[in-house]
């Protein structure tokens, strides 16, 4: 098993590079759980967290697309993927155990921290983990090598195509449903780039996704390329957020 300290160091370096490149999208979680307005403090624990044993919590996943320039809403398949990833990454890094996945009709109907706390209490849960995913996405026409990526030693660019970049933000907050207070919070950022050819050009090298924290490319189906782009960027951001949630827990 890779030591948590090593993983934290690697992810922190990646986070510094990401911070230098983009701070989009802006934090969205405060409108759902309240708390400090300074997004730089998201890795700090807002309340002492008990280290006496595992905490059973419900999970609410919110895909916030309200900001200008935001990517379109995640598909049901992508939401299911991220829900499972939140469970695995958070349970692997912290004493939080996801007992139940809760749903809200829409992000606008969460009614702030009190509404979320009430939702958890109605299910007999003392805690609620709120996971907010948002992303900023842009796409431009470009020229690409027919085989390979120029950054990976591909041939000279010359085929018309498109390049989409998704900057993802994953924010986690553990809410005490008995009083609506946030007891721990964290965030993470990542990006992913999708290159695809202009139809009707066809190549086994496209569409291709390159990620911020991984070397190996991903080759998604053409019809799902954008959704896979957003899912992978969100999951890498989540990976950072889960590690930072562990740090917030340790500080308590």
Image: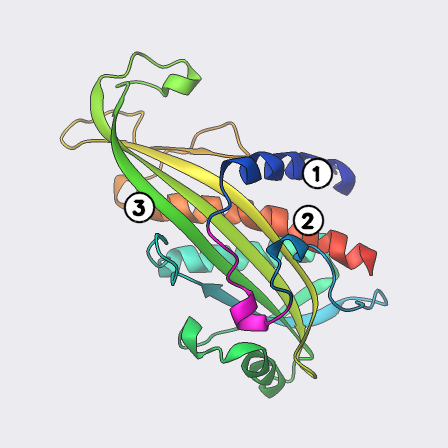
Query: Disc 1 vs disc 3: which is toward the camera?
Result: 1
In the image, the segment drawn in magenta is: 25-35
Question: Does residue 49 belong to the magenta stretch?
Answer: no
Residue 226 visible (yes or no): yes
Residue 210 at what x, y percent from top left?
A: 43, 32
- Disc 2 or 1, which lies upstream in sequence? 1
Q: At 60% from the left edge and 47% from the top edge, which residue is drawn?
A: 239
Residue at the spot 40% in from the left edge and 77% down from the top edge: 105
Q: Disc 3 marks which residue?
A: 224
Q: In the rendered structure, which disc, 3 or 2, sits on the residue that comes first in sequence?
A: 3
Q: Are marks 2 and 1 in contact (CB under 8 Å)?
A: yes
CA neighbours of label 1 inside 10 A, class few (<14), some (14 to 19), many (20+): few
- Does residue 65 appear to the left or right of 4 in the view shown? left
Q: Is residue 27 magenta?
A: yes
| Residue 95 vertical position relative to residue 223 in the rendered view, above or below | below
Q: Position of residue 172 (x, y in %)?
A: 60, 60
Which residue lies under the disc numbered 1? 7
Please, what secondary structure does the residue beneath circle 3 have?
helix
Rendered position, 67 above or below 212: below
Using residue 77 as the reference point, say whether residue 46 is left or right of it: right
The disc placed on residue 243 is: 2
Q: Are marks 3 and 2 in contact (CB under 8 Å)?
A: no
């Amino acid at each position: 098993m890779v030591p948590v300290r090593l993983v934290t160091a690697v992810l922190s370096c990646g986070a510094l590079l990401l911070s230098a490149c983009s701070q989009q999208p802006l934090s969205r979680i405060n409108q759902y759980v309240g708390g400090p307005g300074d997004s730089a403090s998201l890795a700090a624990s807002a309340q002492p967290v008990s280290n006496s044993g595992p905490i059973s919590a419900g999970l609410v996943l919110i895909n916030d697309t309200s900001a200008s320039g935001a990517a379109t809403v995640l598909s049901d398949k992508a939401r299911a993927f991220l829900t499972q990833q939140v469970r695995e990454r958070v349970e692997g890094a912290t004493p939080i155990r996801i007992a139940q996945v809760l749903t809200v009709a829409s992000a606008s109907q969460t009614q702030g921290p009190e509404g979320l706390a009430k939702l958890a209490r109605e299910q007999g849960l003392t805690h609620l983990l709120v996971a907010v995913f948002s992303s900023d996405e842009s796409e431009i026409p470009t020229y690409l090598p027919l085989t390979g990526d120029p950054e990976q030693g591909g041939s000279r660019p010359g085929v018309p195509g498109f390049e989409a970049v998704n900057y993802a933000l994953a924010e986690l907050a553990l809410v005490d449903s008995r009083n609506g207070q946030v007891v721990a919070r964290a965030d993470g950022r990542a990006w992913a780039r999708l290159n695809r050819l202009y139809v009707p050009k066809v190549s086994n090298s496209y569409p291709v996704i390159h990620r911020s924290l991984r070397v190996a490319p991903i080759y998604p189906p053409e019809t799902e390329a954008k959704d896979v782009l957003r899912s992978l960027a969100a999951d890498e951001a989540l990976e950072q957020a889960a590690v930072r949630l562990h740090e917030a827990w340790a500080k308590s």
